[in-house]
Amino acid sequence: LRAVSRMSGRPLRLLIVEDSEDDMLLLLWELRRGGYDLVHLKVETRSEMASVLDETEWDLVISDYSLPGFSGLGALALMKERGLDTPFIIVSGNIGEDVAVDAMKAGAHDYVMKRDLSRLVPAADRELREAAVRRARWQAEKELRENEARFRALAANLPGMVFQFQRQRDGTVTMPYVSEGCTRLLGVAPQTLQQDPRMFLDLILPEDRASYDHATNNSALRLTDINWEGRIQLPGGGDLVATARDSFSETDMEGVGFGLGFAILLDRGRNRSAAANGLFTWGGAASTSFWVDPVEDLTVTFFTQLLPSSTYPVRRLLQRSVYQAVVE
């Protein structure tokens, strides 16, 4: 049975699990009197309810506790199987207080006795408000997880490392976040540096330590961001430029000169490239790439969303395939 109210009020999509037509009409009358504009459907069996749950999204489910061949607990189980957090209220006239409490422990949000339907609208109001709060919290947590995933993907594609550094007034140092680039740059796992943040201080060159201490002390006293530029020692005396190149791109940078925002092929032999010297190129985030070959009069642009850029040597393979296809 489906009915649509034309009354002006708060819209509510209502699923009723009930075998009594009269009891259903009493529920509808009470909710309309409470200011709801209803679109409702009544079901009596497990199969009927399963079907409508799969087809339609509901704002509220009201169920009798006991029906011929079905039950309120059975209806609640169907909701759980589908991972639904729709407010579920049991309205019944033949269950005791203990049974009603057990139903709430099983997941029902509230129960109302049919002899006291004056509680129905306040119960529905409360459960709908709390459901809205849960949805908002779930959405906020989902967006937070997505933002964190995007940040980690971005950090993984930056040369060097990204970290969060905190120094308290008493000198205590913590690093709440350290990117995976820490391993490539410093030869130390992020977790190790987080457990002992002072390891980072030991890497600062002695002649830069005084300026570092001044910057961090000033930040702690004024509660402002740290603004410091200094030098650190890499393990084994490594070269920072070479380390950054290897950690940032799958492209071989030997024999390549760099300008602001682009690269030019200077020595095709060292680079092991099929292109001629003078190739103008650059690669962006997510493995995107472009190049201009003035010798072959060739322009290539390649757009993809493969993160991090070092996942697969797609740029090198693309260039090889393009030049193999060039016909003299």
Image: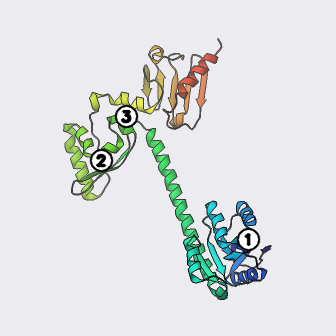
Q: Position of residue 101 (x, y in %)?
A: 56, 78
Q: Quadrant of residue 23?
A: bottom right
Quick check: 221 left or right of 18? left
In this rendering, the answer to whether 76 lies above or below 100 is: above
Q: Could you give the CA–CA distance between mark 3 and mark 2, rounded to whole angstroms? A: 18 Å
Which tag is nearer the camera, tag 3 or tag 1? 1
Residue occupying the point 22% across, 53% down: 171
Instruction: Kindly identify which residue carries mark 3.
Output: 184
Q: Which of marks 3 and 2 is nearer the N terminus?
A: 3
Q: Position of residue 296 (x, y in %)?
A: 60, 17
Q: Position of residue 163 (x, y in %)?
A: 36, 45
Front one among 103 and 168 = 103
Q: In which quarter of the image is residue 115?
A: bottom right
Which tag is nearer the camera, tag 1 or tag 2? 1
Instruction: Kindly identify which residue carries mark 2.
Output: 195
Residue 187 visible to an observer of this rendering? yes
Front one among 280 and 221 = 221
Q: Tags 3 and 2 in contact by the CB under 8 Å rule?
A: no
Q: Is mark 2 on a helix, strand or loop?
A: helix
Task: Specify the quadrant that holds the N terminus.
Answer: bottom right
Front one among 259 and 315 = 315
Instruction: Kindly identify which residue carries mark 1.
Output: 69
Residue occupying the point 78% across, 80% down: 21
Q: Position of residue 60 (x, y in %)?
A: 66, 72
Quick check: 110 left or right of 4? left
